[in-house]
Amino acid sequence: MTEHIGSPILWTVFGLIIAFLLALDLGVLHRKSHEIGLKEAVGWSVFWVALSLLFNAGIWAMFGPQKAAEFLAGYLIEKALSVDNVFVFVLLFSSFAVPAKYQHRVLFWGVFGVLLMRAAFVFAGAAALEAFHWLIYVFGALLLVTGVKLLLAKGHTEDPARNPMFRLFKRMVPSTPEYHGERFWVREGGRWLATPLLSVLVLIEITDLIFAVDSIPAIFAVTRDPFIVLTSNIFAVLGLRALYFCLAGFVDKLRHLKTGLALVLIFVAAKMLLSEFYKVPIGLSLGVIAVLLIGSVVASLLDKRPPAAA
């Protein structure tokens, strides 16, 4: 049985820290809607990465280098896979013409919903793997198929608005095509109508539900500890909004990043599928993941061809 480090006290302290950070973010630092500039976005990105590394140092001090390496590997995997979310955010905000000053508010509540979904996925996945060890091979096969599909894809991002769940939402929930400031709902003609901001928020949640099917099993490839899986996932997701505002202007130039992500998924899939015969050391896993991701970014920066038309 896998050793779990998450005591009730540790879970409680972590939950209180995350609740405080979210309340500080929306209730104090971003109480008034405004357009997020590159300088502010970079500052927030540095803050979230530094906070994650500080937490990682705490894991090292309390539980040793093995658990710290597992956290860092899980954080890198989730941080890399979250770039796919950025591609979708760019598509959604441009398709729905979301005013720049309201984008942070939509992403805040989107990330809040993502945190709840990821927590449910992690606890369900951990319980399932404890009860049915063979599920690791199902997860591995799922990641392998996803990685190969991503590797062979032409680079176009599928329109999330065509998702069947979103179409069902549009049929069931009356809506208005007009924006009403930062409001998700507006009352017109005696009934409540969803504004386009709510539609974008729903699409963000649907998209992450799909992405979670890949990202959660991928982290279980490097650790089975629910505390490490969830905390590394949450810290990566908390920095997702800042990452979007940093990358939105040139995300299309990272043409080789998806190749790097695909190779990471294929690597962790192989790690899962071969786990019964060979345990890949966590240090080696961390090195391979870092090299694949850094290499794909460097290759993208060196590629001077203009971005392909979508």
Image (cartoon, rainbow, N blue to C red):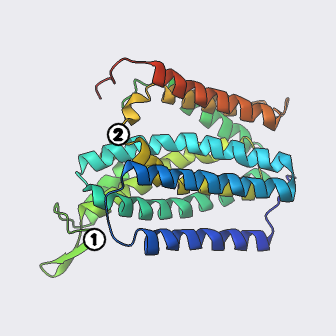
**Upstream in sequence: badge 2 or badge 1:** 1
Q: Give, as a three-letter code, the residue at label 1.
A: Arg
What residue is rendered at 61% in x and 62% in y?
A: 120
* Residue hosting label 2: 249
Residue 166 placement: quadrant:
bottom left
> Is residue 162 visible from the viewing direction of this image?
no
Task: Tell me if 211 is positioned left or right of 280 in this view.
Answer: left
Q: Give, as a three-letter code, the residue at label 2.
A: Gly
Task: Tell me if 100 is positioned left or right of 76 in this view.
Answer: left
What residue is rendered at 29% in x and 69% in y?
A: 184
Instruction: Calculate the distance from the C-alpha at mark 2 to the C-alpha at mark 1.
Output: 26 Å
Badge number at residue 183: 1
Residue 171 placement: quadrant:
bottom left
Residue 194 lies, in percent from the top left, at 25, 68
**Category of crowding for the residue at label 2, using alpha-carbon neighbours closer than 10 angstroms: few (below 14), some (14–19), many (at least 20):** few
Residue 128 lies, in percent from the top left, at 72, 54
In the foreground, 181 or 158? 181
What residue is rendered at 51% in x and 59% in y?
A: 114
Image height of 97 relative to 306, above or below? below
**Category of crowding for the residue at label 1, using alpha-carbon neighbours closer than 10 angstroms: few (below 14), some (14–19), many (at least 20):** some
